[in-house]
Amino acid sequence: MDLGAVTQRSALHAKPSGLVLQYGTAGFRAHAGHLDHIMYRMGLLAVLRSKQTKSTIGVMVTASHNPEEDNGVKLIDPLGEMLAPSWEEHATRLANAEEQELPRELVGISEREAVDLQQDAFVVVGRDTRASSEKFSQSVIDGVTALGGLFHDYGLLTTPQLHYMVYCRNTGGQYGKATVEGYYQKLSKAFVELTKQASCSGDEHRTLKVDCANGIGALKLKEMQQYFSQGLSVQLFNDGTKGKLNHLCGADFVKSHQKPPEGMEMKSNERCCSFDGDADRIVYYYRDADGQFHLIDGDKIATLVSSFLKDLLVEIGENFNVGVVQTAYANGSSTRYLQEVMKVPVYCTKTGVKHLHHKAQEFDIGVYFEANGHGTALFSKAVEMKIKQLAKELEDNKGKAAKMLANVIDLFNQAAGDAISDMLVIEAILALKGLTAQQWDALYRDLPNRQLKVKVADRRVISTTDAERQVLTPPGLQEVISDLVKQYRLSRAFVRPSGTEDVIRVYAEADSQANADSLAHEVSLAVFQLAGGTGERPTSGLCG
Ligand code: 16G
Ligand code: MG
């Protein structure tokens, strides 16, 4: 390790002294003005991780749905997964080391992780469309080369595309070709094959309006649409040519405000969807004949997907172990529907993709979605092989079902939730089942819910258990929440410290919107009182 070169180059990416940042749920995120040293150091760390795992590692420069002025970075592990938790700690330590401590910190990490420094390192880099991202990806590359690593810069990519590239490269191309073209071809081929089997439906049925959050999703969807146009035509809005990234649009905006994005014309009963800023989340929605807006979130996507998969498995007579993974944010109606009507086992994990992804890997087929629209379906290698073999052997309806399953496996991004891939899966299922958005939405009715946030002096005072559904500390808070919940029908409430913002998040649901609002408000007051609230006391009617 040429520590001289590392230190010398680091001076060009000097850390503002005293600045402390943490590798959170989705990597580092902060105002872009604070991040240059982080980018350089994540380049360094990616080299160490690559040497240790003897694999290609990804570094994605993005801050997803955050405002344009922010940016962020995260590392992608060999199978396209989120960085292992022990390395998140290394990332935080490395990010916060003052300039003169940097070499010692690097040596420390290499020793603790038994990194073979003679090993080659290869890092792939991608970035979103933020103004600061290009320069930042250059800083990442500076870090990679300072430690003698080799790299490939993919330039502009959606986050899930970079996950896909990493996965392809580390499986010797078995998963697919590690190029943007390879991604487009793999997904589009599976999609077109699938939709060919749909009985002819009207043109209007196959048109989808897509709000691209003025982000990278617009560029990539524009490039890709010619590949799948046989099966679907997309109309792009908020494509980045006029509006600001994530401003009054995108999946996060639509989900949290429960209203349509600006910049999209919606006629009644038109099927619409929104991506977030780095295209790893998707939510659907429509307006009914009375002009009322209806959101179809990640929970309903999970339900649509798992019911489709289950039907096909019944058809081919295979009894694979299927599980659905959600978080505490999943609407109670969705959990009840999955368990009681569809009879699929449902599991709850902590918030954050890595938790859901790992749980989903325990099943033959694991479907995971956060209510906010991040998710995918994972198929074990054995199941994939079996289904692909059945697709060749079986005939008639069974053969048709097996072929559909084989294509669905190829269409899902197995490395990460992916707005483009999920969109194509959903569109294929709706076409095959002949469902409109309204019919899909009518599977079950969401319980009214409300999310709020409360500012406290130190959000670490709140700790949780039971997949964030119960509070452990501060003492007494859980009892108050449980008492409040008892006062409402069909109610549920929980609080947790955010992993991406300096706030406590509050979630409540109940039999009516007024009751959900009131429960959320009362829980916020309890948090404010018992967990050291700062600023103004929460007032009712505030939407977080
Ligand atoms: C990040 C997570 C997302 C989670 C959200 C929660 C990834 C790739 N993304 O965006 O899964 O739902 O954080 O945010 O893990 P919060 O902790 O601020 O509520
Ligand atoms: Mg995102």
Image (cartoon, rainbow, N blue to C red):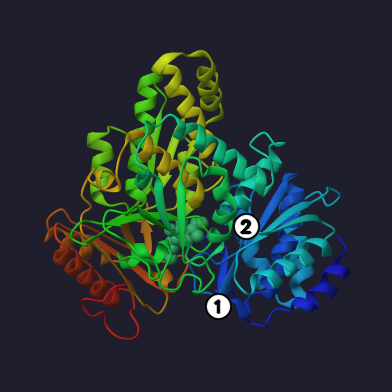
Residue depicted at 18% across the width and 56% down the height: 491
Q: Is residue 314 above or below residue 73?
A: above
**Number of numbered discs on residues:** 2
Q: Nearer the viewer, mark 1 or mark 2?
A: 2
Numbered disc 2: secondary structure: loop
Image marks 1 and 2: residues in contact by CB distance under 8 Å: no
Question: Residue 266's image quarter?
Answer: bottom left
Res. 157 mark: 2
Q: Is residue 411 left or right of residue 138?
A: left
Nearest the viewer among 393 and 526 is 393
Residue 390 in the image, given as x and y percentages of width and height: 50, 18
Q: Is residue 479 left or right of residue 322?
A: left
Nearest the viewer among 452 and 254 is 254
Res. 310 mark: none
Q: Is residue 433 above or below residue 103?
A: above
Q: Residue furthest front?
A: 203
Cα distance, mark 1 to mark 2? 19 Å
Is residue 529 at all visible to an observer of this figure? yes
Question: According to the image, label 1 marks what residue?
Answer: 69
Residue 455 in the image, given as x and y percentages of width and height: 36, 78
User: Which quadrant: the N terminus?
Assistant: bottom right
Q: Earlier in the sequence, mark 1 or mark 2?
A: 1
Q: Is residue 171 left or right of residue 536?
A: right
Residue depicted at 62% across the width and 74% down the height: 131
Residue type, mark 2 in image: Leu
Q: Is residue 489 above or below residue 15?
A: above
Numbered disc 1: secondary structure: loop
Residue type, mark 1 in image: Glu
Residue 157 in the image, given as x and y percentages of width and height: 62, 57
